[in-house]
Image (tube, grey):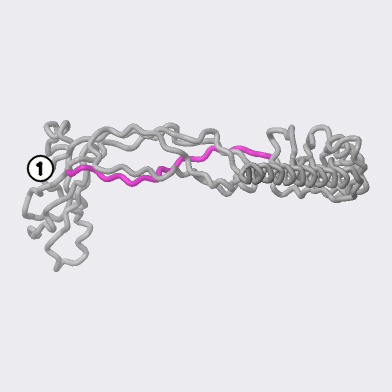
């Protein structure tokens, strides 16, 4: 019997607690509803957003200050704005007039647009500023070369066979004249490749500061390059004397010089000594006591890399 009585008392207590909570919540809702039903005078900050800006005009949207509107409205309307802040969209072509490099709006336009935005239940007390003046720049374009930013590491014995090809090798930049005028090239993002032994065919992004006021005609280019295995070879090339006066005869030694070079395996068989030219310029001899001349590699085929002469000097004597 006592157990049943305790159980009954527990149920009654829970019902009383829930009833108290319900009426407490109801009182709170009624209080909030009463507060929001009253009229308030508050200042709203409206972020200005320009739309329909012509393509040949640049405006820094972040430099446009918000409009402060002091309004009288019910609490419900003010709460709605706090929960979902409004932007004031201004049509550049219809709201603004242009004078030189300035665009300005009439105060009546701004107040009207704020009223349209916030609704008829909102009374506009004041607007600061009551009109908006915005500086802008005319956009220009310029073609600039692309500069490759690379870090290539080749497998031993491998190297580029020819120049790296960029497609395209130049891009059009568009922006305000002040910004465009200071740009002479556009650099790629760093492309890093290791242990290269095959041909290169990759795409790379063009690097542009996110805060830059410049736009690019494209954001990416293609890079291609032929890679070949190289070997080191040597040829013996006759030494020619240049600049020798007609009344001077000399004898010199040695008569040939060894030329070392690197060449792609596919080109190695067609390299012959006649493709090279080693000369000694007699004009270097400005003192009769000098009996040596430094040999110069005057010509070498385009397909070889790092050509160099092993011989440091040529000895000569003047024949009377």
Q: Quadrant of the C terminus?
A: bottom left
Which percent across, then down, holds residue 25? 77, 44
Left or right: 123 with respect to 81?
right
**Most foreground residue, 311 or 147:** 147
- Farthest residue, direction front: 1
Q: Which residue occupies 28% across, 36% down?
A: 162
Left or right: 87 with respect to 197?
right
**Most foreground residue, 104 or 113:** 113
Quarter of the image where one finds residue 33: top right
Left or right: 166 with respect to 41?
left
Residue 190 included in the magenta stretch of the image:
no
| Residue at disc 1, secondary structure | strand
Q: Quadrant of the N terminus?
A: top right
Left or right: 15 with respect to 155?
right
Query: Number of callouts in the render?
Result: 1
Which percent across, then down, holds residue 20? 77, 46
The residue singled out by tag 1 in the image is 235
Q: Which residue occupies 82% across, 42% down?
A: 99
* Label 1 crowd bin: few (<14), some (14–19), many (20+), radius 10 Å: some
Q: Is residue 243 above or below residue 290?
A: above
Which percent across, then down, holds residue 241? 16, 50
Q: Which residue occupies 32% across, 37% down?
A: 163
**Magenta part, dominant SS:** strand
Quarter of the image where one finds residue 221: top left
Q: Is residue 48 visible?
A: no
Q: Which residues are magenta?
A: 139-156
Q: Which residue occupies 31% across, 42% down?
A: 193
**Most foreground residue, 110 or 302:** 110
Which percent across, then down, holds residue 46? 79, 45
**Most foreground residue, 103 or 263:** 103
- Farthest residue, direction bottom: 289
Q: Is residue 185 visible?
A: yes
């Amino acid at each position: 019997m006592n157990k049943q009585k305790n159980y009954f008392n527990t149920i009654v207590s829970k019902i009383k607690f829930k009833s108290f909570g319900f009426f407490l919540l109801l009182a709170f809702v009624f209080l909030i509803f009463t507060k929001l039903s009253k009229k308030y005078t508050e200042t709203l900050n409206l972020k200005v957003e320009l739309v329909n800006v012509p393509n040949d005009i640049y405006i820094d949207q972040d430099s446009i200050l918000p409009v402060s509107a002091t309004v009288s409205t019910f609490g419900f309307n003010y709460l709605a704005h706090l929960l979902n802040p409004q932007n004031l969209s201004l049509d550049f072509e219809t709201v603004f007039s242009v004078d030189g490099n300035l665009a300005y709006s009439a105060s009546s336009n701004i107040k009207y647009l704020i009223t349209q935005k916030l609704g008829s239940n909102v009374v506009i007390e004041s607007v600061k500023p009551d009109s908006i003046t915005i500086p802008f720049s005319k956009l220009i374009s310029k073609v600039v070369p692309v500069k490759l930013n690379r870090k290539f590491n080749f497998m031993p014995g491998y190297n580029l066979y020819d120049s790296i090809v960029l497609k395209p090798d130049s891009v059009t930049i568009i922006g305000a004249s002040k910004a465009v005028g200071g740009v002479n090239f556009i650099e790629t993002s760093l492309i890093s490749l290791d242990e290269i032994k095959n041909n290169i065919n990759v795409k790379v992004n063009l690097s542009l500061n996110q805060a830059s006021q410049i736009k690019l005609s494209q954001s990416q280019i293609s890079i291609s390059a032929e890679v070949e295995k190289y070997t080191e070879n040597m040829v013996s090339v006759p030494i020619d004397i240049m600049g020798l006066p007609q009344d001077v005869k000399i004898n010199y030694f040695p008569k040939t010089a060894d030329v070392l070079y690197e060449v792609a395996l596919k080109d190695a068989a067609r390299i012959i000594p006649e493709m090279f030219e080693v000369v000694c310029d007699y004009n270097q001899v400005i003192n009769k006591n000098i009996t040596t001349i430094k040999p110069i590699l005057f010509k070498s085929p385009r397909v070889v890399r790092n050509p160099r002469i092993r011989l440091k000097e040529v000895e000569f004597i003047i024949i009377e």
